Image (cartoon, rainbow, N blue to C red):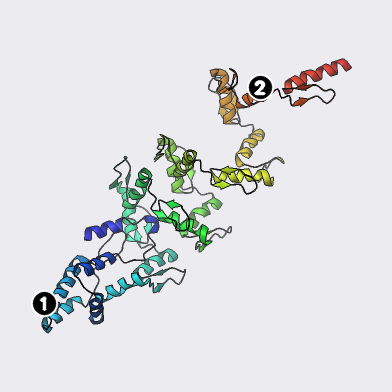
Amino acid sequence: MEKSMDANVEGKVKNEIEIYDEPLYTRDIEKCVKESNISREELGDIEKKAKPMQIQDVDMEFGEKYVKYEDRVEETTEFHHGLRTNPGDKQYQNTIYDKHHSHSNHLKIHSRTHAGEKPHQCTMCNKAFSLKGNLIIHQKIHTGEKPYQCSQCDKAFTQKGGLIIHQRIHTKDKPYQCSQCDKAFTQRSDLIIHQRIHTGEKPYQCSQCDKAFSQSNALKIHIRKHTGEKPYQPYQCSQCNKAFKTKFDLISHKRIHTGEKPYQCTQCDKAFTQKGNLIIHQRMHTGEKPYQCSQCDKSFSLSNSLKIHIRKHTGEKPYQCSQCNKAFKVKFDLINHQRIHTGEKPYQCSQCDKAFKQKIYLTVHHRIHTGEKPYQCSQCDKAFTQKGNLISHQRIHTGEKPYQCSQCDKAFSLSNNLKIHNIRKHTGEKPYQFSQCDNTFSYSSSLKIHMRKHTEEKS
C-alpha cells in the first residue's frame, strides 16, 4: 500500500502541485470499511470516543506527509472483530480503544472529501483547502517563501519534492523512461504526459462542449471560455498593465522591459528571456522533433506545430472571420486576414511613412533603408532581401521549373508566371488597355511596346 501511495504522489502532474484538495489516504479508508465489514454507525462510534493521533512524518517527493495506513487498516479490522467476539470484555475494549483513539482526526478529515468541506481559507486569494497543511504550502506562493535551497546552484523551492526533482538536473538522473521512444524524464508525471503523444489520449473532457485535453491545466484554461472567469493574477507589472498568476511569470515578463536574456545558447550567440524558449531553440541545432503525427510520417519540434499540422488531415479551420466566410487553421492567420477588412496597418516604418499589416513585411521593408541583403546565392555574387527571392533566383542556375500548366506542356520557375500564363493564354483575357486607342494586351510589356508606336508616330 505504501508503494501504491508513493506512485500516487509521484504521479501528480507538476503544474497541479498547488492543488491539494484530497487527503492521500481516502481510498485506503474506504478499503478499510469494505474489507472489515464495518458499518457507518460503528465508524461514528469510534469517532466519538477517539482522540487526535500523532501523525508520523514520511518524506514524499512533493514534501507532503501522510499516515502509514497499512498497519492502521489491520488494527481497525482487528478491533471490530474483537468487539464482535468479545462484546463484554471491557479490558479488551479499553486496550484496543487506546490504539484507535488516534483515528478520530483522520476520520474527520476524510469526511470533508464527501461533504466538500474546505475550512482552511487563504486570506490572500479565494482558494480553500480541506487540510491546514495544504493551505500552509499554498501560502508560500503568495509570500515567496522557498525554504528548500539547492546546494549546487541558487535555486530554491517551496516544497522539498520540488528540490528533489530539481537536483536531477545536476545529477542527470532521468529515472522515467518511455517504452515507445528513447525519451526519459526526471518526473513520472512528465512521462505520463509525454506518453499521450504516442497514445493520443485526452482524458480531460470539457463537460460543456466536445473538447478534450491531454493535461488538466489546459482544460481549466478552456473552461474559462464558457464561464467568462478571469484567472486570479495578483502580480502586477509596474511598467505596464499586465498581471500574472505567479511571481515567476512576472519576473519573466519584466525581462521584456529590461532586455535581460539570461538563457544563452551554448552553440550560437542567441539568448532568451525564458528557459523554455532556449530548449525549443536548441532543437534547431540537434534536429530533435519529438512531436510525431500519427497519420503521416511528419514530426515537429513544437507541440503547437503538430496541432496545426493535424488540421490538414482533419480539414478543421476553427478560426472563422466574422465579416466574411473565410476560416483559418491558425488564429494568427485570422488576425492578419481581418486587417483586410479594418485596413489596420499596425507596423509603422520609423524611417518613412510606410506601414504594414504584418511585422515580417516591415522587417523586409527596413532592408531598403539599411541596404541589407542577408540571402546570398552560393553560385554567383547575387544577394537578396528576402529568402523567397533567393529561392526563385537559384532556379536560373538549376533550371528547375516546378510550376506546370495543367492545360499545356508549359512550365515556369515562378508561380506568378504560371498564373499569368493560365489567365491570358488559355482564357484570352487582355487586361492591359491603352487609353488612346481600343487595343488591349495580355501583358504589360506588350502594352509598353505599343505605346512607343504612338509616340513615334507623333514625333
Which amino acid, mark 1? Thr
Please state the horizontal and vertical placement of residue 403, each as a whole percent of the image. Answer: 57, 23
Q: Position of residue 319 (x, y in %)?
A: 56, 47
Amino acid carrying label 2: it is His
Q: Using residue 71 as the reference point, say whether residue 308 is left or right of it.
A: right
Q: Is residue 309 visible?
A: yes
Q: Residues within 10 Å of mark 1 (few under 14, many from 20)?
A: few
Q: Nearer the viewer, residue 210 or 113?
A: 210
The one nearer the camera, 398 or 211, is 211
Residue at the extreme right of the image, as rendered: 458
Q: Quadrant of the C terminus?
A: top right
Residue 308 falls left or right of residue 37: right
Q: Is residue 344 visible?
A: no
Contact between labelled residues 2 and 1, with CB atoms less than 8 Å apart:
no
Q: Which residue is mark 2?
A: 426
Looking at the rendered structure, the secondary structure element under dot 1 is helix
Place residue 432 in its image quadrant: top right
Picture residue at 81% right of the left edge, 24% below the top: 434
Residue drawn at the location 65% of the way across and 42% of the way down: 357
Height in image: 266 above or below 160?
A: above
**Residue located 47% across and 70% down the image:** 124
Label 2 SS: helix
Residue 44 in the image: above or below residue 127: below
Of the numbered discs in the image, which one, if any, rests on residue 85? 1
- Along the line of sight, the residue nearer the viewer: 283 or 369: 283
Q: Give the Cα separation between the discs numbered 1 and 2.
A: 101 Å
Compared to residue 172, the image places residue 28 above or below, namely below
Q: Nearer the viewer, residue 68 or 424?
A: 424
* Chain-order first, disc 1 or disc 2: 1
The reply, left or right, for residue 159 in relation to residue 389 is left
Q: Position of residue 195 (x, y in %)?
A: 34, 46
Residue 226 at x, y percent in the picture: 51, 59
